[in-house]
Amino acid sequence: MQEHQPLLFRGASLVDGRVDQDVLVRAGRIAAIGTALAAPADARVIEAGGGLLAPPFVDPHFHMDATLSYGLPRVNASGTLLEGIALWGELKPELTQQALVDRALQYCDWAVAKGLLAIRTHVDVCDDRLLAVEALLQVRKTVAPYLDLQLVAFPQDGVLRSPTALANLKRALDLGVDVVGGIPHFERTMADGAESVRLLCELAAERGLRVDMHCDESDDPLSRHVETLAFHTHRLGLHGRVTGSHLTSMHSMDNYYVSKLLPLMREAQLHAIANPLINITLQGRHDTYPKRRGMTRVPELMAAGINVAFGHDCVMDPWYSLGSGDMLEVAQMGLHVAQMTSQAGMRACFDAVTVNAARVLGLEGYGLDVGCHADFVLLQARDPVEAIRLRAQRLQVVRRGRVVAQTPAATAALHLPGRPQSVDWTLRR
Ligand code: FE2
């Protein structure tokens, strides 16, 4: 295919419920959307067959420096967050830049094949060599034609608790890392946690950067660093540029306190990220029964007007042994854990891995509208709920107007008279 050959998708369903829509792409942008569009003479035409043409999946929370390291140097026996951090600490001295790059690129292949075209990844800055930072900066450049990679300078061992973390974090930002990270609940004391939030927010304000902190990833109902994060966001005028990731302690907090907290988060225009696969796996490990789910209060945050996105967080690393870069799996787990089973709830879970996540990253030109980048995925499903239910095949993945991945539709060889071979997954009444 020529670099700027026009592309016309015929007969697609869209997320907003429109059906039978044609989408025309020119020069990497969406040029027109409508019914029965005329195909330019030099256009490549792809029949969508009523499939859902959606904006690409976006993962707002990932750890690409640790991905695909499962079993190195051993597996996490207890399955806890803290053993995962200790295990990552054992692995860090063994890392090489080439191994980091190779694993990250392999994951990017998986991501693109699954229609995942933008990822915000945290990168640990507590290794004085900054090997992972340099590796992921290289990967960010290499994969830029295929996916947007946004890097967060993440002081895994605590920006105050680890003696060289602050200096390393600043060096990482100087090298071009995009976002300021933090982990207040891992500092030595609550007071140190609050101090880390203050200094990291001030650093971001000075440099004009966004903030994304691992915040209150704990079952401790008194872990309230999100309150401090909202306070400094408001004080420094960082509205809409700060994200609280995980926020699992909110699951266990007192309801009255949460009724005060939610408006403060809304006032600061904080973004919230739940990581359903990881939260349901790591939280509640100290409980007997009943055992807490541990994921933050997703429907309540959404109802309060806070932008909530779902992240994958981990794939085959010290914290999680499964995963494949499939954001529909993430949405499906979030839907179950949050009991978001209404039609509106299920659709909101699709938004959590697409448009809401794009808002966290601040992506420009994202969406399925005229003038947006021609980035989208054709799913073997009619609508977002069916896409989640089926974890639908990504028939075509398009980036800047070029097809970058394809997966065949499911077929079945029941040679019955009058029936097509392609599987129809829709509900018949
Ligand atoms: Fe994380």
Image (cartoon, grey):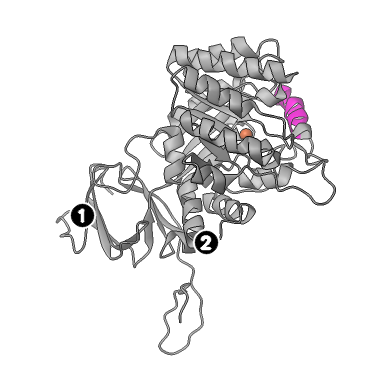
Report if residue 35 lies within the magenta region.
no
Indicate which quadrant contains ligand 1: top right
Residue 425: x and y in percent read 48, 72
User: Residue 314: which numbered mark, if any?
Assistant: none
Residue for badge 2: 342
Say what amino acid the circle numbered 2 marks.
Answer: Ser
Q: Quick one: which residue is furthest to the right in this view?
A: 288
Magenta segment boundaries in residue numbering? 84-94
Locate the C terminus by quadrant.
bottom left
Q: Is residue 47 above or below residue 356?
A: below
Residue 390: x and y in percent read 53, 63
Residue for badge 1: 43
User: Does residue 63 appear in the picture of this structure?
Assistant: no
- Which residue occupies 52% across, 13% down? 203
- 193 vs 113, left or right, is right
Tell me the element at label 2.
loop
Task: Looking at the picture, tell me which residue is in the foreground, 346 or 97.
Answer: 346
Numbered label tally: 2
- 89 vs 418, left or right, is right
- Which residue occupies 47% across, 17% down? 236
Q: Quick one: which residue is furthest to the front in this view?
A: 256
Q: Is residue 241 above or below residue 71?
A: above
Asked if ligand 1 lies within 8 A of label 1, the reply is: no
Say what amino acid the circle numbered 1 marks.
Answer: Ala
Q: Answer with mark 2 or mark 1, whichever residue precedes in sequence.
A: 1
- 165 vs 284, left or right, is left
Image quarter for residue 227? top right
Residue 383: x and y in percent read 42, 62
Q: Is residue 342 above or below residue 317?
A: below
**Looking at the image, do the residues carrying marks 2 and 1 touch, with CB atoms under 8 Å apart?**
no
Residue 424: x and y in percent read 45, 74
- Which residue occupies 65% across, 25% down? 183
